[in-house]
Structures are given as structure tokens and as C-alpha cells.
Image: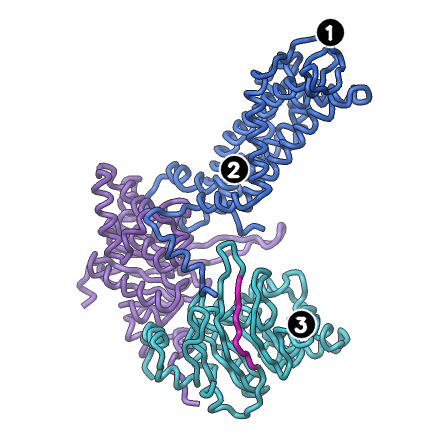
Amino acid sequence: MQSTQKNIKNNDLLLEVNNLNVFFNTTDGLIKAVNNINLSINKGECLGVVGESGSGKTQTFFSITGLLSNNGYCKGSAIFKGFDLISSSKKERMKYLGKSIGFIFQDPMTSLTPHMKIGDQLSEISIFHDNLTKKESLKRALEVLDIVKLPKSRNLITSYPHELSGGMKQRIMIAISLMCSPELIIADEPTTALDVTTQSEILNIFNDLKNQLGISIILISHNIGVIAETSDNIIVMKDGSIVENGSTYNVLTNPQDKYTKLLLSCIPPWLDV
Amino acid sequence: MKNEATNILTVDNLKLHYSSAKGFFSKKEIVKAVDDISFNLLEGETLGIVGESGSGKSSICRLVLNLISKSSGKITWFDKDLDTFNKKQMKEFRRKVQIIFQDPYGSLDPRMTIGSIIKEPLDIFNKKFLKKEKEKIITELMNDVGLSNELFNRYPHELSGGQCQRVGIARAIINKPSVLICDEPVSALDLSIQAQILDLLKNLKNKYSLTLVFVSHDLSVIKSICDNVIVLRSGKIVENREVNDLFRNPENEYTKKLISSVPSPIPLKR
Amino acid sequence: MRLLKKTDNLEMSYSLKGRSLWVDARRRLFQNKAAVISLFILIFISIISVFGPFFIQYGFSDTDWSSIYQPPSLENGHYLGTDGNGRDLLVRILHGGRLSLSIGVIATFVSVFIGVIYGTIAGFFGGKLDTFMMRVVEILYAMPYLIFVIILMVVFGRNIYFLFIAIGAVEWLTMARIVRGQTISLKEKEFIETSRALGQSNTLIIIKHIIPNLAGPIIVYITLMVPSVIILESFLSFLGLGVQEPLTSWGVLISEGSREMETAWWLLIFPGSFMVITLASLNFIGDGLRDAIDPKEY
């Protein structure tokens, strides 16, 4: 992990993952989905995780946040600000998840409860974690809506998810993860289900979160363009292992690993800058 | 150079409107999925149709194939109106214009073997062929699309997404169509597989002298394979131009925004 | 620790012969202990019902006035005792089993046959035809089926063949609804659309693509419908509308047994247990099949 330590603004270690392994018990036997992964992320840094389907990129971060399905279990450690997320109990972990660590999923259409108003869905989390009153949390909700560049209107707070477009829903998802002022946001394919124009707006928001609020972001994506536009450092995964890591610029302009080279050669030629 | 090519398919003022009632008593609202679209398809070209979700690009594919019926407009196939086709002519048209879909697994019947899936069009159009002949055609075609013959008796769920897409392509071209419509053929695939399928389509296009209609939301894919591009937005054509011309100097504001939104894989030095 | 054993397995089991979804489903079914045990019990009960009576010295209608209401005993050969007419209970249970099981199977197939044809046509062609066909089903649903069956029995007389038809005619409604729903969701699948684009005729699309893909839910539903038909038959027999003496079914036996429960407990307990075991087995098999055929559902 030497190379990841370069070109970052400050050196506060936020999350450190050591020798992480993830297994699944299936009817076909034990499957190893993630193989001995080490990674670290500093404050205010954006880490891009690239890999094709089945590379274990999602399962790595599901295991850290305790989102693995019932037949999965993991070994190793994930130290978040001196606290091991993996060996701790569910109750202890809940103090961090949703509060200091936000999670954003791929599909904004199904990530919101259809029967609850946007405002209620936003305030729910800060009432739970920060013991705010309903009124205070709605005030906070208006603040975060401003951060994700949605109009701070009462209209939005009282509307239901089906009244919003995909891009707006994804912004609401980001807003929910921002409610408790997190230090780390893990975004799993946050723009895959969205159109290109919406995608670029969402990526701008991510850049703002990182640059203005100093929030660390782990961005999981199969789209190298998305990673290139946002992340400082990059991890390339294949079959559950990290094949290459380093600063985004170095890895993408001068790849060392055979698989990374292959992956980059597959990108259709885009406008040469 | 394109001007000399023959015009094989013409679409004039094609519309697909349907009404949706919001409530029992409220007034019906008309949704214009495809709104007044006209374009020509020239022999041998690859026509790209690009648009975001809800722009009506999939509806156009299905309208051209007569899988759904249009509200108004005219589709002409070699100077003949599609509406005037009788059953036999329609069948012949279906043989000449084929489609492959986005979902590689969804477009294959899960209960059929790969061999019988590819064979289906032969059973429809070449009933007189012997079993042996059919098998020979299929195995040759499987080689052409890069599928091992060992897969003949396997089932779709045992294949990878890329392999399934190759099966779909083989089935589409077995009767030597002249037009192949590709509805987001690589969107569900991984990057490396995507490149392979695009290469395959380019090769098959030359080998079988196909005319391709390539529908995608991905501008970089469109740019790498198409000759001419139609940019769609909410059912309307925004721009219809030669591909390099379009990408170098887009005229329409929406096209400009679309092109500038694509994240570049070349990172800025930080 | 083996890395990604799943893909390893795939490579190793690589053969020219494909593994169809049915083979997969069978493998999953045989992993389900409850379903496998139930399957064996069901096969055992069917075999003894069909062949058992040939090996018993008493006929199902032989009366023996010297041994009325005999409790079960090993000495006189009435292993499960006798009824008020001195008839051997074991042979009557087995005979009743023949009838109950065959009513279950035949009536189910009648209803599946009508239901599948009706449902696929309504679902596949859709539009006004679908609306009309489904309104008909809804109207028939609204008719109290018991009265419907009673009328049939009264008009055509108490004939067991009419019993088959009457029950089948009632049960097909549910089948038609299920098949229609499944057909509509299948119709939207891209492989059906491709088939239409290929120029395949509607009839062949239904036969080649729709029905094979409906087979899973239909099979599951059959295993759950057989027990409900057996119960329906018992109910009708209990009311005196079913099978007539000296013929018998489990329902008739239970109905008779319940009347003499206090004096001759065996007349209720034994037929009752046969029926309960059979129905439970069928339900376990149905559950097992559902999980095996569509593993995503649970």
C-alpha cells in the first residue's frame, strides 16, 4: 500500500482493511469471494474500486459494513478510526454505520421506501443516531438537500419517492447518507442505473463532498471513466483479489498489471483531449 | 459516398402515442413515446440511435419490426409500405430484418439447448432442410460467432453473458438477414466482453454484408461502431448526422451536453 | 481453501451434455429430506392401495356377520379391525385409497388441461379476449361451488365419473388464473419477443416457448391441488354426495368412522391417518418442488 500514501492532502488514516477474506456457503460448497485484501483510505480521499462483475468489489465493502447475506462470513480486520468493524458486535457496529459511514447503493429506484415521505426518510436516520427531534432533523434535512443541489423547498420534503426522477432519488440517497455528517461514504455503482447527463451531475456532487466537506469516498464502479473523474487512488480487482493499486493517474496512464492493461484496452476510443 | 448507397428502409413521420389516465375521473394524458420521427437506412451503413432512458429508442426498434403497432406514420421497405404487406410478405420481411436484445439471458429460452435455440429460425423458414444440413449450418455459424461447438447441447444458464449474446447473434443471422437491429446489445456486459462483442458485430457486418441499426445509451460505444448517428430526446430526433462530424462539432445544445457528460477515462494529473 | 470453487466445478463437470434446468431442479429436490421421504411414503401408499387388496383374503364388500366391530387384531386376520357389517377395514381403506387418489389425480388433470389452455390463450392474446375470458372466470368463481356440484349430482345422478368432472370443473378456475398471470409475465420476456421477430407463429410460440416455461409452476400447483381435490371429495362424501356403497373412499370411511367414533375408534383413526399422511406428503413434495424449480422464491 505504499503507493496509495502518495499525493494526498493529509495523512490521517481513516479506514484500514487487513487480510480480508469473504466466504459464501452455498449448495455447491464453500466459495471464496474475496481473497486476502489489504487497503487503506485517508481522510478526504476518494478511492476508486474497479472490477468486472464477480470480481468481489461489492462483497469486500458489504463485509466491512456487515451487509453480507446470511450464508456469507468474513475473516480479517477493518479498522475504522481505531475500531474494528469486523470483530465487533452488531450493536457496537451500528454506532458507526449510517452515522460515520454512509452507504449508497446502485439502484435508487428501490433504495427508498415507497410509502414514506422524503422528509421522513431523511429525518429517520438522524432521529435514530443523533437523538434529534423531528423538527431539528427536518432542519438538518433542508441543509443536506442544499449540499446535494436539490431545491430546499417544503414541496420536496413532503413528496413521495415515485414523484421523483432517478437522478433526484439518487441525490436523496446521498442526502440521507449525509444526514449524520459522515466521515466516509461507500458508494456502490452509484451512477450505473442513471443516464450520462445525470451521472455527471452526481459525480460533481461527489467531488464537492470530497473537496468542500472533506468526506472520504469509496467509489465502486465498473466504469473506468467514472473512477477517473473522481478518485485520487484506484484499486483494480479481479476474481476477489487486488491486481493493481496506486494513484489513479499512474494506474490509468501507465498500468503495470496485465489485466489492467487488458481492461484499459477495451475502453472504446473516446475524444482525444 | 453514402449517397450512392440504396435506401432500404425509410421511416416517415413515425408516431407512437398512448393515453394514460391518471385517475378514474381525470382527463386522459397523452404520452408521446415516439413523436414524428423520420429517417432513412442506407444499405451497408451502421446507423446509431443514441438517447437517454425514456427517449423512445427501444420503441423505435419494435415499431420498425412491427412488434408493436404504430399510432401513425409510414415505414417503407424497399419502396413498399409495410402496412400493405400480406402475411407471406411480412414473414419474408421478418426474415430480412432481425433483432438482438440487451439482456443476454432474457433473450434465450431457458428450457432450450443452445443448438435448438439457434435452430429455431431454420425450422421456420427452411423446413425442407435435413437434420444433418441444419446441424452443419449451425456448427459453422457457431464458429463464426466464436462459440465452441461443445456448447451445442448446453443450456443458457450454463453460459456466460457474453456467450449468450453470441448465441443471440447467431440466431439472428442464421437466415442471412440484410438488416440487424441491435437494441443495447452490450449494455449488460462487462467491459472486456463488450469489446469482444463489438468486434464480432463489426466482423459479421463485413462477412454477411449486414446493415446495422445500433441502439445504445453509451456514446463511446456508438462512436466506435457507427457511421451515422441519430440523437433522440423524449421521442424526437435532435440531430441526425455523420458520426465524426457529430462528435467534433455538435450543433444542438442537448447533444453538446450529452457529449460533455461522458466521463473521460483519461485522468487529470492531480 | 479453494478459490472460487463454483467455477472450478463448472470446468470439471464440463461435458458435452448440458445440465437442463430440470436436472438442476431434481438435484435440489433430492437434497430436500422432507420431500424425498414424502415421495417414498406417497409411492408406498399408492402401491399398497393398488396391489394390496389382491393379497388380502377378504374382499372390500365381503360381510362377515360373525365378526362385527372387531377391534384390530393379528389373530383373525382383520389387522385394522372390522366395521358394523363385519367388513375388513384394511381392505376397505386400500380400496378407498384407490378411489381417493384416482379422483385426486384425474380431477386435477381435467382442471390442469382446461386451465392451461384457457389461461395461455387469455394471457397470450390479451386485450378484449382476455378481459372477456377472465370475466367469465370471475362469474364462475362467484358461484358457490358446492351448490354447483350438488346441482350436477342431482341432475346427472350420483355417478363417480361426474364427481371427477364436477370437481375438475370447479378447480380449473384457479389454474386458469395462475396460468394467465404467468403467461402475461412470460410474454414480456425478450425471448418471446425475439421469437415473434423471427416470424414464428403464435401457436408455435405458445407450444414451444410458453408452455415449457409454465411447466414449473404448473407442476408445483398440481401437487398442491391433488390434496385439495381429495379433501373436496371427502367433504362431498361426508355430506353424502360422493361415492356410494359398497364402493368407498377415504372421505366415506372417515364420515362413517366419525359416527361410530365412541364405540369403534379404529374406524376413524386408521382411514384418517392414511389421509392425513398422504396429504401431508403431497404438501411436502409440493413445497420441495417449488423450492427446487424456482430457488429464488424463498
Rendered colour, chain A: cyan
**In what element is the residue under mark 2?**
helix
Query: Residue flagged by tag 2: what amino acid is it?
Result: Ile
Q: Which residues are magenta?
A: A16-24
Instruction: State how far apart marks 3 and 1 are (Cα).
Output: 82 Å
Would you name the residue on which mark 2 appears?
C219
Rendered colour, chain C: blue
Residues A35 and C145: in front is A35
Q: Which mark is residue C65?
A: 1
- What residue is rendered at 28% in x and 74% in y? B244
Name the subunit of mark 3: A
Query: Residue flagged by tag 3: what amino acid is it?
Result: Leu
Q: Position of residue B140 (x, y in %)?
A: 22, 51
Badge 3 crowding class, 10 Å Cα cut-off, few under 14, some 14 to 19, many 20 or more, is: many
Query: Residue flagged by tag 1: what amino acid is it?
Result: Trp
Instruction: State how far apart marks 2 and 1 are (Cα).
Output: 47 Å
Q: Which mark is residue A122?
A: 3
